[in-house]
Amino acid sequence: MSEHNYLLLTPGPLTTSKTVKEAMLFDSCTWDEDYNLGVVQSIRQKLVTLATQSTGYTSVLLQGSGSFAVEAVLGTVIGPQDKLLVVNNGAYGARMVEMARLMDLNHHEFHCGEVNEPDVEAMEAVLKGDAQISHIAMVHCETTTGMLNPLERVSGLAARNGKTLIVDAMSSFGGIPLDVDALGIDYLISSANKCIQGVPGFAFVIARRSELEKCAGRSRSLSLDLYAQWRCMEDNAGKWRFTSPTHTLLAFAQALRELEKEGGIDARNIRYRANQQRLVAGMRELGFETLLEDGLHSPIITAFYSPKAETYRFTEFYQRLKQQGFVIYPGKVSQSDCFRIGNIGEIYPPDIEGLLTAVGQAMYWDL
Ligand SMILES: *Cc1c(COP(=O)(O)O)cnc(C)c1O
């Protein structure tokens, strides 16, 4: 297998650097100090530093993919007297609604269609009409469409109304600058294999310490108890409750060093934006149209309408791109036939140029 057999233009797992992959060539002992203090605690501290300058935050790492951490937050944070408003404008918002339903949490689904920005005034009206609502959960970059949800306005809304704010920043954290304290975010969730550019295996939560401290004994699940996981890491200097994904952590530590070397989140954001803008411009030159208006796009992933030609099949297009070294993603929007191209990970503008040439070659359908 070559160093890169193909580039992943997907929303995670992503193309990672060779050095991130090489960092895994070591077997760590889970109770060893070099691992717990040197790797785990250092990662936890660095994550908080990336998220804010405030000292009121802490971080928790959790085994599994990103959804595990979303479920852990909802199940650990929402008490029996609480009620959660979930913004749903895509598959990941819908997944939180499904979690709330399965865990029997009091919740209100704020559905706003997949291609529209959430209407913050309408949300405020819901809050005014239902005093029991205590928490708001929203996805930051809705990876389904690539939409960047209006985080500042929703955080203002949460602050004005005294609600606890939970943000699924899975596909944006590390690629879009933000400060959790300035935005009043109480829980921010992301995972190892998105914009930090690590490999899959764990997720993490950056939490306002004073909020997390209230959550003892609330969890509906043993292994997804965010509070218990946090206490274990706090009280035992970075020890995980159950088997920790040791190799993934080593890769993540290396990915954090590489993020720093690139110039931090601001520099990475500039690269991702350059990738996304070139992608959209080039795809438009080839005749493709984006699902969303330009103002709603994130610099992370873009949804394009499928060509209307009768002979077009996603799988055929996909195979032709893969043969040329590029892997794209199917669509996930319910009402429209789309495909998606991500531009995060170890991807640079020359890779996007290469992709555009490959797309030109792969357009086999009748025009
Ligand atoms: C990737 C992603 C998740 C988590 O997905 P997993 O497959 O569980 O890792 C959640 N929310 C968003 C917005 C995502 O992009």
Image (cartoon, helix red, strand yellow):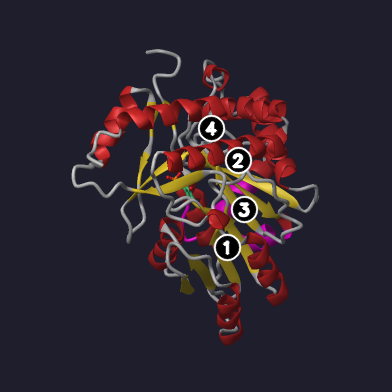
Mark 2: give few (<14), some (14-19) or many (20+) Cα within 10 Å: many
Q: Which comes before the other along the chain, label 1 or label 4?
A: 1
Judge depth for marks 2 and 3 and give the one in front: 2
Badge 2 marks a residue whose secondary structure is helix
Q: Can you say whether 358 is above or below 205 in the image? A: above
Residue under circle 4?
345
Query: Horizontal and vertical percent for residue 306?
Result: 32, 48
Residue under circle 2?
273
Judge depth for marks 1 and 2 and give the one in front: 2
CA separation, marks 1 and 4? 31 Å
CA separation, marks 2 and 3? 22 Å
Q: Which mark is residue 77?
A: 1
Mark 1: give few (<14), some (14-19) or many (20+) Cα within 10 Å: many
**Camera-nearest residue between 154 and 256:** 154
Could you tell me which quadrant the N terminus lies in?
top left
Q: Which comes before the other along the chain, label 3 or label 1?
A: 1
